[in-house]
Amino acid sequence: MEVSALELAASALGIMLDPSRLMVLAAGVLVGLTIGVIPGLGGIVGIALLIPFTFEMDAYTAFAFLIGIGAVTTTSDTVPAVLFGVPGTTGSAATILDGHPLAKQGQAGRAFGAAYTASLLGGLGGAVLLAVSIPVLRPVILYLGSPELLAICVFGMSMVAVLSGKAPLRGMVAGGLGLMVAMVGSDPQTGTMRWTFDTFYLWDGLPLVPIALGLFALPELADLAIARRSIGGNARVDTRSGQLQGIRDTLEHWWLVLRCSWLGASLGAVPGMGAAVIDWLAYGHALKTEKGTERFGEGDIRGVIASESSNNAKEGGALVPTLAFGVPGSASMAILLGAFTMHGLVPGPRMLSDNLEITYSIVWSLALANVLGAGLCLALSNQLARVATIRMGLLLPVVLAVMFLGAFQGSRQWGDLHVLLGFGLFGWVMKRQGWPRPPLILGVVLGDIVERYLFISVGRYEWAWLSRPLVILFFSLALLGLVTPMLRNLRAAVGEGARLRWQPRLSPAALFTFLIGAMLTASIVVTSQWNFEARIVPLAVGYTALACAILSLFNEIFLRPETAGAEAAATMEGTGEEPGQDLRTVLKRAVEFFAWCGGYLLLARVTGMLAAIFVLILLCVRIWGREKLTLALVLAVGMTAFSWLLFDRLLAIPWPQNLLGEAFPALRPFLR
Amino acid sequence: MSGTRNSAVAASALLVIALFAPLLLKADAVSDFYAGRQVRLLIGYSAGGGYDTYARLLARHLGKHIPGNPTVVPQNMPGAGSLTLANFLYNVAPKDGSVIGTFARGMAMEPLLSGEGTRFDASQFSWIGSLNNEVSVCVSWHTSDVKSMQDLETMELIVGGTGSGSDTDTFPIVISNLLAANIKLISGYPGGNDILLAMERGEVDGRCGWSWSTVLSRNADWLAEGKLNILVQVALQKHPDLADVPLITEFADSEDELMAMELIFARQVMGRPYLAPPGVSAERHEALRRAFDATTRDPEFLADAERLQLELNPVSGEEIDALITRIYAASDNAIRLASDAIIGINR
């Protein structure tokens, strides 16, 4: 048995190394890398679009192609994450935290070197884990029932504590807000419309892409706009030497790579646990287990390594339930499942017996794609690192335009752009006020599945499921993870002699907390009209978050400034403040930045998105960047043409209606 | 004499031309309109699901059967379980035949049953056809004591569901409400295959609302090994494979109950519905219908469907029109029975 499996693995490698298949795999990798660089486009888009091309291929080649696309989007998504703080896919948001500060310090090359090497090794780690666990896949998955999946997700949620740094209360509030955002829309149990405010847009819930871009990307761009300098500033940009340094960094931290890779692969196998949280959980794991983590969030290379090695391993894990049971571990796996049936393959036990050779060829495709993807990125990263030296006035409008188009891929409605801007503003204030943002995204992604599995567990087993061994284990780990950092902070606060002050101190921070509290209260009040089953979980979350918000507000108002300040400034993320900026300038420039964004939205409603992009880039580059008119014109024409080709011709996006087009139907074909 | 004959010939020739000219002209008008044009096929769901797969398959082949051979471009316009698209097609989309769409199979009955958020009159849509008349089944796993519908009078069957509004939730709810059957629904599974996995590991006893074609393509081994008891088939007509399995409508006790069932399960006939907005000119509507029919007989289309393992039981636009007319003529009592059965949450 052992030997025959090995033989099959070897013969599968032989099949994959066929030159024509390798070519197809390489083509898939190229498509995947391109898609990964563009925010908002993930592997799903590519796979769905290109599946017809695989009709005529044999099964091995078809999977090589599709897996080539899916496997490397999380390799190249590092590029915009490091350079602009814009995650290329939702899986690289955690890379921003340290990758982008590195770029600002002129070390983009090092960040790239480390990230690609970590992606490569992480991806390989995931493939290896998949390969060696093939014999035990089915029993393991059959053992994991809904209560166990719930416990794993709750354990994931408990990472909120680590990811909140020294602001655990704020982290809890942010996590609670995230969970509540996840519950917007039609409730899966009863069909109750929760927090939809009579808009169709909210029926299906808020899409993840604009939320992630808003929370993490827009605040970075706002701060770049406020700082008014090129990304790398005056620092010399490292290229070749930095890259080598990055590779060395990763190899040095091989144990971290391995841990995060296996974490990513294992969590990837849990349906619903998407790329958007796995990078954060790995980042949290690194924070928890590594020594000397004070510099995390300011450009510690280990932050980049943890995040990147986990998100490439994820695909290997996601393949597990897909192959063994036909239960897609991720959205792109759901499409891959369609490709399986197309080639007459039925996911299930036979993939692990009769069709084992195909399964192994899939594992090899995954491994080869990761090698190719990382290799290509490494080869190109010298040029890419230099982007950090380009003037902000040229770069920012282009990145902004791409981000609007990317956010629009969330659900292809105007609402996506409102979500982007809303969460962008909220995220920027959070960042400036020292509120941790990762707990929020954790809540958004995990909220839905936690509620689902909770209802299934209670509906099926009432409370008996709480006594299952794995449930007890993961719940205890979660509790431990939540409570220890809190106690440590409390002890530290007492040690530092936190004392109440009797003169209340009102600060912008307190005002923001107060606003969040008011928002939570309003949300809780709205639930009174829902029926019990639709209301119980949102209420529990809402009250917990509100309690934490009130406690946090109390801290901010009544605690001595030193201790309260310590909580505010010491989240693990930088607040984006640069020396020598007074509040007035910051506010003025922030208003300017968000006004440009709002202006774009308004204009797009009138003229359509593409025409508005032309105007945005032209005006932005000319007026705000003070560049030459011809240069602005060239950029605007180039970007508009590129967007038109990609989104209109290639992706065939249904553009939303615009006012001019409605008024003058003859103009419609030109107003996209 | 010959003069009169000649003039008679000339007159009849003229008559013939006069009779057929509009037809010739119209045919040209239709193909003139579509030639070189893009026809958008809007899909009410995001990429990757069943509706998307069927629609993309149709889009690949439909164009060559429409006069003028337009390119048919599939576009995803998700939102509110495809309600957004239904409202868009009815109220906003151009009514010139350049936009067609596909949405949830139950959408046409939605105004009768709940009506929440619907801004359309289903009978006014220019129905083109349905690619599949689906037969779904309710099954119990071989370890369950429930082996037939009769057993449900005395024993409980726990089935899994994927969420409010889905077939896997609606069918068990309707059956247990209309027939007082002992079905307990555990809802919230992320997808249909998750329910099967839960069944395999003993978390639930069965699944109600599982299309027969999927059973065959995905779990034929379970059938062969006798791991499934097929309790009932949910459709308006029996599937040829399942002659021995009772049809859900056989359990109706009254005329109104039968009508209520037809009202709810008509969605099976419109399994993969295609339609154009209301008010598309009769010639273009006709051209789209005939193109649809021709596509469903196109060997290349059939070969692709075979490869994708998509079941095809085409239903013509005329048949859908007739069904909708019949359903909308249902008595108030039948409609009330149906809407009570569908929203009654059984716990």
Image (cartoon, rainbow, N blue to C red):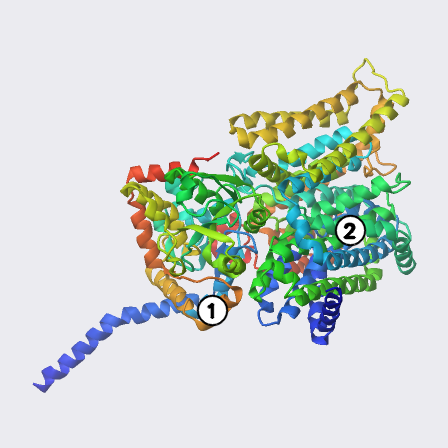
**Along the line of sight, the residue nearer the viewer: A398 or A379:** A379
For label 1, the residue is B301
Residue at the bottom extreme, as displayed: B2
Q: How many marks?
A: 2
Mark 2 — residue?
A: A262
Expressed as whole percent of the image width and height from the top left, the position of residue A201 reads 54, 42
Chain letter for mark 1? B
Q: SS of the residue at dot 2?
A: helix
- Say what secondary structure mark 1 lies in: helix
Circle nearer the viewer, 2 or 1: 2
The furthest residue to the left? B1
Which picture quadrant has residue A127? bottom right
Name the amino acid, label 1.
Phe
For the point 32% across and 70% down, the residue is B25
Task: Give the image quarter of residue A351.
Answer: bottom right
Is A219 placed above or below B280 here? above
- The picture places residue A96, in percent across and down from the top left corner, at 78, 47
Task: Quadrant for residue A153, please give it.
Answer: top right
Relative horizontal placement of residue B222, taking residue A388 as reference (left or right): left
Q: Nearer the viewer, residue B193 or A134?
A: A134
Residue A652: assigned label: none
- Who is closer to the viewer here, A642 or B48? B48
CA distance separating discs 2 and 1:
44 Å
- Residue at mark 2 shares a chain with residue at mark 1: no
Residue type at tag 2? Trp
Position of A162 with respect to B313 (left or right) is right
